[in-house]
Structures are given as structure tokens and as C-alpha cells.
Image (cartoon, grey):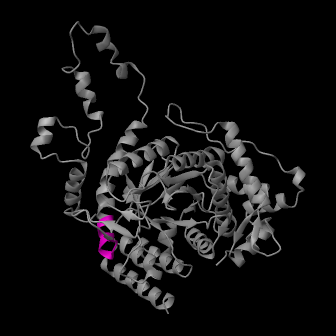
Amino acid sequence: MVSDMRRSRRERKIGDKANKSPQTQPVKGSSFSLPPTLGAPGFAFLDNTRIDQLRERTFSLLEEHGVFIDHEEAVKTLKKAGARISNDGKRIHFPRFLVEQVIEDTPKSVTLCGKTEEWDHALPDPEGRFIMRTGTGAHGFIDGETGNYRKLKMTDVATIAAVGNHLDQIGFISHPFVNGVPERTSDIHGFAELVTLTPKHVWIQPYETENVEYLMRICALAAGGESALRKRPIASCIATSFTPLELKQMDVEAIIQASSYGLAIHACSLPTAGGTAPITMPGTVVLAAAEILSMLIVTQIVGSGTAVIATPLIFALDMRTGRSLQSSIEVMQGVSMSLQLMKQGFGLLTHTYGSGSDTPDVDSQSNAERSLLGQLVALSGADILGGVGQLECATVFSPVQAIIDNEIGQMLQSFLRTPDMDDESFAWDLLKEIPQGGNFLANQHTLKHCRATLDPQVFLRQARDTYEAENRRNVQEHARDIFRSILKKDPLANLPDEATIREIKKVVKAGDAKILD
């Protein structure tokens, strides 16, 4: 389903550059860097020199090694646009001029639409805030009431939707991996259920090439039709490289079909340092950047030129056990560097895990790791912090953990808000007049500003006597109380009606019949 190559302004520019000799191509430095927001706090491992080093290595890797692409039509279209094809017809080498032109042409903003405007999120956020999303792909589930672990089942989708609907930091919700349905079409079943239960933006994650068409049909029904979906894309779609440096047919097809409806693409690289990527993080960062840019190129040249959100999800191999890690210190360094490279080096929107842990349960390790990760990712400038509620290296979902994550997100949003510097914030008149032994409790300035401080609902601020009188209730128990109250709330408005739900179920049934035959 590769769209035909109409000679648009963008394509003429690419074609014109392709016909020039390499010596005539401009060499760009950090031309895609974004100026820092005045007064915004931030953190960076990389200075401009190191960003330029990583940029140059990324361009070189795409041109010298290239990317394996398993999609015959896409390869033909890329060749017409100026890419060089290896003798085996699979490895695609991208010259620098082509990559730079595509980066320049890629939209630098997008609105992730909900079913109504009140749930829309513009990226980048005009106030410099991030949004969060729930974890995806987890096969396991920790029951919010009992704390027991089991496989995630279809009824848990409603729980995830309810939790995501009523947590204020959650900008959009991901469909989980559902057990108890055919494994090959689990994505179709899970997405079909989720999209009928939330008015918020949703994330599509295809599991097989044939499934993409059915996921798009379901999305169009939930949006009110294909034209309505194109006008207000209520979903965005992940496309994931197969590390190292390969794009499978399913992910190319997901880019083509999703972008034809105007759905933003989360171009995701999942390198595992020491496994599918170099054990040293600079090498992993370059590999991830090359994979993300290859998907950016496919979206702009083969797809329909929609927004692309750079999504480096960095992992590392635990050399003692062989298990994957998402919250080790090395991973955190890699994630931060990847965000800075994609945002400041290439000027792209960014998305990565801002929550998560390598421990199996909602415990002190989990909350320590996700707090460190979230703060680093937020300070590194991510537009989207993913992984709310996920545990055990993104394989388990816990609604109680999601509620704690939401509060951590609130803290981070407040933390990133740089205070004003003026007479009001200095309380200047009061400071000049304060008498010996005075205080600031009983004055209008304190009354005016006292509600501007963050008032946590989950975290404890108790004295010892109260703590003991309440039988040492902890953060998890507070979160569990909130979880119970969420389940008692009425469903939100603007959900698909019964007729639409029946049509969606028909698509699911048709998908099973076609794909499982």
C-alpha cells in the first residue's frame, strides 16, 4: 500500500538534490538545534561538540552501513527518492542530503487528539510540560485489590482504561497484550476493547502485518469514519525497528497505513546494550538514532509525511543473568543522551520511558528507580513520558503503581516550573517590614499563595502518632484506596455508541477469520 510518488514540493527538492554531485551538498552543523526555553530547568550529558559527534556518526552509519528494509514497494520508492540500494536489494543506504532534507520537512509539532477537544494534547506543549502514557505490551497484571500476579486478561482492559481516564497526568492510553484471545490477533482484541472505553487519545501497537488493516478500520469506526479520523486522529501508532538496523514488513506497513490517516508515528528503537547494541552507551545511542531516522525517512517519502515522534526505548543486558534492564544507571544515561540528540541534534519531538522499574513488584526499589528515571527524562526534555504502571522491565502492569506514578508525574511537573522572580515572589514588602520574632503565617501574601503548593494525595505527610494510629498505612495502601474510588466512578462521556461497538466487534471477528485461517 505504498502511496504513489506525486511530485510534491518536498519530493522535487529531494529529487533536485539527488541529481547534484555530493560535493555540492551543504554540510550542516547543529542546524536543527532547538534554543533552550528561557528559565526552564534542564540536564544534559552532552555539549554541542558531543551532539555534533553523535550526529555525524548517525549520518555516516545511515550512509555507509544503511538499513535492511523488508518491504519491496517501499524499497523501490526510496530508490526513486535518492537512496542507494545494495546488490541484494535489501540494504538501503541513505545519503546525507536525503536525511537532512527529510528532517527539515518533518512536522515539528502535532496534536494528539482525543474524542473531544478537551482531551487534546499539543506537542510540544506550549507551557513546556510533558504528558504521560500508560505502559503497553505487558503480559502480566498485578491485581489492584489483592496485589496478586496473574496473566493480563480482557477484563483488565476496562481497569486500565478506568485508571487512565481518571489520572490527570495521563495524556493517552496504550492497549495491552491480552491473554485468553488468539495470540496472533491479541492486538486487535485489546485495541478494540480499549478504544470503546476511553475518550482519551490511544496508542496502536500492531503485532503482525495483516493486523494493521483491521486496527485502522477499528480506529476509523471509533472516530466516526475515515474522514473524521483524518480530521481528528484519535490515535497514534508505534513502528519499531528490529535492532540492529532492520525494518520489518509489519512496521513499514504500519507507517504507510497509519500515516495515510494522519496518525502520528512513534518511531521506536529498542536497542539492548550488550545484546543487540554495543555495550557502550554512545554506540547504542547512535544505533538508536539511525533506526529512528530510517523510520522518519520512510514516513516522509513512502508514507504521507505525517508527524514523527522520536522514541528511543533503551535497554541493557544484565551480564550476570542475561535479563533485560530498563532502569539501570547505564540505561538512564543512554536515554538522556538519546533524548538530547533527537531533540537538540535533529529538532524532533521525543518520547521514552519516564516510568518503570526492573523489580517485579510495587516496592521501594520500584519507586526509587522510576523516580530517578522520571526526573532525568523530564529534565532531558522528553515530550512524552511512557511506562506508567509498568514493572519488571515493561512486562507487568499494576494499577496501584500507575496511581503512584501519576503523583510522581505531578511532582515532576511542579518541579520543572521555574518560579517567577519579582517583588511578589520575593514577598519584598513583607521582608523589609518583618519585625523581630515575626512570622509569615498570618498575612494575606501567605493566604494568597498557600494553595499553589502541591498537595499530594498518595504520598504520606503524617506525624508518628497518626501513622501508628492508622496501623502504619503506607503509600501502596493509599494508592489502593484511590484505585477503589476510581472503579466506582461513572464512565466518561463521548464514548462510542452501541451501534459503533457492534461494528467494531464485526471487524474483530473478520480479522480473526482472515488472519487465523
Q: Residue at x 18, y 20 (%)?
A: 442
Q: Quadrant of the N terminus?
A: bottom right
Does residue 456 appear to the left or right of 27 in the view shown? Answer: left
Instruction: Work out whether 488 lies above or below 26.
Output: below
Instruction: Work out whether 493 lies above or below 422.
Output: below
Q: In which image quadrant can residue 234 be found?
A: bottom left
Residue stretch in magenta: 151-160
Q: Is residue 354 visible?
A: yes
**Percent of width and height locating residue 300:** 67, 63
Residue 158 drawn in magenta? yes
Q: Residue at x 21, y 62 (%)?
A: 489
Instruction: Work out whether 301 lies above or below 29.
Output: below
Q: Residue at x 33, y 75 (%)?
A: 153
Spot the residue most to the bottom: 517
Residue 42 drawn in magenta? no
Name the residue nearer the viewer: 287 or 279.
Answer: 279
Q: How would you classify the magenta stretch by its main secondary structure?
A: helix
Spot the residue most to the top: 436
Q: How many marks?
A: 0
Does residue 278 appear to the left or right of 15 in the view shown? Answer: left
Name the residue nearer the viewer: 108 or 331.
Answer: 331
Q: Residue at x 54, y 78 (%)?
A: 208
**Percent of width and height locating residue 240:** 57, 66
**Percent of width and height locating residue 412:** 40, 42
Does residue 468 appear to the left or right of 459 in the view shown? Answer: left
Q: Is residue 126 visible?
A: no
Spot the residue most to the front: 320
**Percent of width and height locating residue 262:** 55, 66
